[in-house]
């Protein structure tokens, strides 16, 4: 059952993080990698990677992914998600790339990181990807000190997507 607080915690973890760990598989072997991300205009988690990277090759075979965001001491919290990951179509790349870079960087950092949209289209070295979150869970914190059981609380996906959608 979804806890009201679980959604607000999930939203805070997503909005206050620049990196997540993405897990992929080719159907035989799993792989995970930390990646910079932002929230796309359709409430997806957007990142880019080199097409020759292992996780990009996995995504060609299997779009099912898992992802996690965690904070560290002194306060520990975490979000675990699963979803489907697809390549951003060429027709959307310019809009997605502009939103991605301008929401993560500014000034000299933006000038250094941002590249033309055509460097992320079919046949290029990099591609943008978007994860459509289908399930999410936060760490159960209320009873942990008593039970010491590491449990998760379900996050309401519809609420989460509405609350993380960029203005």
Image (cartoon, rainbow, N blue to C red):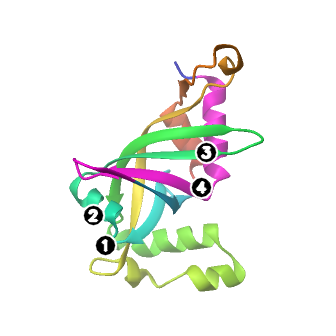
Label of residue 52 in the image: 1
Viewer-side label of 2, 4: 2
Q: Is residue 166 above or below residue 11?
A: below
Distance Cα–Cα, label 2 vs label 3: 26 Å
Mark 1 / mark 2, whichever is N-terminal? 1
Q: Which residues are magenta?
A: 3-31
* Secondary structure at numbered mark 3: strand
Mark 1 / mark 3, whichever is N-terminal? 1
Residues packed near mark 2 inside 10 Å, few (<14), some (14 to 19) or many (20 plus): some
* Secondary structure at numbered mark 1: loop
Label of residue 166 in the image: 4
* Secondary structure at numbered mark 4: loop
Label of residue 57 in the image: 2
Distance Cα–Cα, label 2 vs label 4: 29 Å
Verify CB contact (< 8 Å) between mark 2 and mark 3: no
Q: Is residue 25 above or below residue 119?
A: above
Residue 102 can be seen, yes or no: yes
The residue at 50%/83% (across/down) is 115
Locate residue 62 relative to residue 126 in the image: left or right. left
Label of residue 70 in the image: 3
The residue at 69%/14% (across/down) is 146
């Amino acid at each position: 059952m979804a806890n009201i607080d679980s959604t607000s915690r999930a939203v805070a973890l997503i909005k206050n993080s620049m990196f997540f760990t993405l897990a992929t598989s080719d159907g035989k072997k799993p792989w995970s990698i930390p990646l910079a991300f932002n929230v796309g205009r359709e409430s997806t988690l957007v990142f880019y990677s080199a097409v020759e990277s292992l996780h990009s090759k996995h995504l060609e075979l299997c779009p099912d992914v898992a992802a996690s965001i965690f904070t560290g001491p002194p306060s520990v919290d975490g979000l675990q998600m699963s979803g489907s990951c697809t390549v951003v179509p060429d027709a959307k790349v310019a809009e997605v790339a502009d939103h991605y870079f301008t929401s993560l960087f500014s000034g000299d950092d933006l000038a250094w990181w941002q590249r033309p949209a055509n460097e992320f289209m079919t046949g290029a070295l990099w591609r943008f990807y978007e994860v459509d979150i289908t399930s999410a869970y936060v760490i159960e914190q209320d009873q942990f000190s008593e039970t010491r059981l590491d449990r998760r609380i379900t996050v309401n996906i519809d609420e989460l997507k509405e609350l993380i959608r960029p203005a």
